[in-house]
Image (cartoon, grey):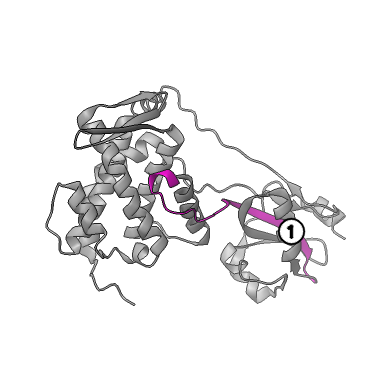
Amino acid sequence: MANPVHFDKAFYNKLAELTEYEMWFLEAVYGLAGKPLFPTWPDQLIYFPGENKPTMLGYMSANIIIGDWRSGFLAAGSPLVFVTTFKLFDMFIDLVLENNGFAQTFRFQQKISQLKNGVLFPNFIEYRPWLKERIIAMYETLVPFRGTIIHNKHFSTTDGNLKVSSSQRGVIGPEQTIDREQLRELTVLVISIIHYVDGSWVIDSYKGKVLQRTFDTLQKFHGQPSIGQLLPRFLTVRTYVKVSDIKINLKTIRDDLRQYCPNEDVVFDLRIIIASDDKNTLTAYLLPWSEIENQGDEIILGHSQLSKFISRIPDDIKPEEVFHKLP
């Protein structure tokens, strides 16, 4: 059913205009623009020809910039990062309330009351009740911490970890810690929600799992029940087959991934390296997760199905070794 509150182009243009500086600042502080939130890696689980078991490869990245200001800023500037993240969150909430017909107000308790009174959000949120209820609850939880940092100064910061007490109407609550990892998660979460809402980022099953996992790790900031999302992991599986036998046992791959990645929710693309019968040519295809996730235990692929997934052959592949070892 269509959302009866119309979130039109004017809404999204205004959202982009109002949040432009805060989005830039936070992405710059965390280096999000230069360090993808969802990085791609070389193939990690590889079924090498001639071997009985797959090989699991691990990769890591480092991004070191001599003289970069961001690490020093994050060590001391966590209060500003928190306040800027909340401001971004608050501007989004203000626009949603305005689009629901409410007059602008600077009274947070009034906005919280309005949010709990049947407010409609853009479809990305409205069609996900679990997301909507956590956004509203998180906003309510964060309001007193923002008030403390702005008005009452009952906070301290050490090496990027923020300790703050909620304060409302002169009542100071118990001290809580927002460690630097939680602060980063919170910032990335708010940025992600806005990007998904305005359509500049496209959600898929894996990114949906990441979003749910993030809310689970930040449970103390919304108080809603855990979704129970395991740690999502994305990787690429590689397997080798002959052109005359393009048959993939997905059950074996899934079983092996459960063994190598216990307690993780693994999503994978499948790279298939096909050797010609004359042992002269290798061809590579990369099947995205969307083509695999709903398949059964085994898939048999025809060349017409594979043609749209053709990809480059990874640099580490030596054709002569493949032809020699492939049964």
Type of amino acid under label 1 = Asp
Q: Is residue 15 above or below residue 244?
A: above
Q: Is residue 33 above or below residue 119?
A: above
Q: Position of residue 136 (x, y in %)?
A: 32, 54
Q: Is residue 55 magenta?
A: no
Q: Quadrant of the N terminus?
A: bottom left
Q: Is residue 240 magenta?
A: yes
Q: Position of residue 88 (x, y in %)?
A: 27, 45
Measuring 43% from the left and 42% from the top, which residue is drawn there? 185
Tag 1's secondary structure? helix
Q: Nearer the viewer, residue 145 or 273?
A: 145
**What segment is highlighted magenta in the picture?**
219-244
Q: Is residue 21 above or below residue 212?
A: above
**Pointer 1: residues within 10 angstroms few (<14), some, or many (20+)?**
few
Q: Position of residue 282 (x, y in %)?
A: 73, 60
Return the residue at label 1: 255
Q: Nearer the viewer, residue 42 or 18?
A: 18
Instruction: Tell me if 9 is positioned left or right of 227 in this view.
Output: left
**Quarter-of-image position of residue 289:** bottom right
Residue found at the far front of this picture? 171
**Quarter-of-image position of residue 29:** top left
Q: Position of residue 91 (x, y in %)?
A: 23, 49
Instruction: Tell me if 320 is positioned left or right of 254 in this view.
Output: right
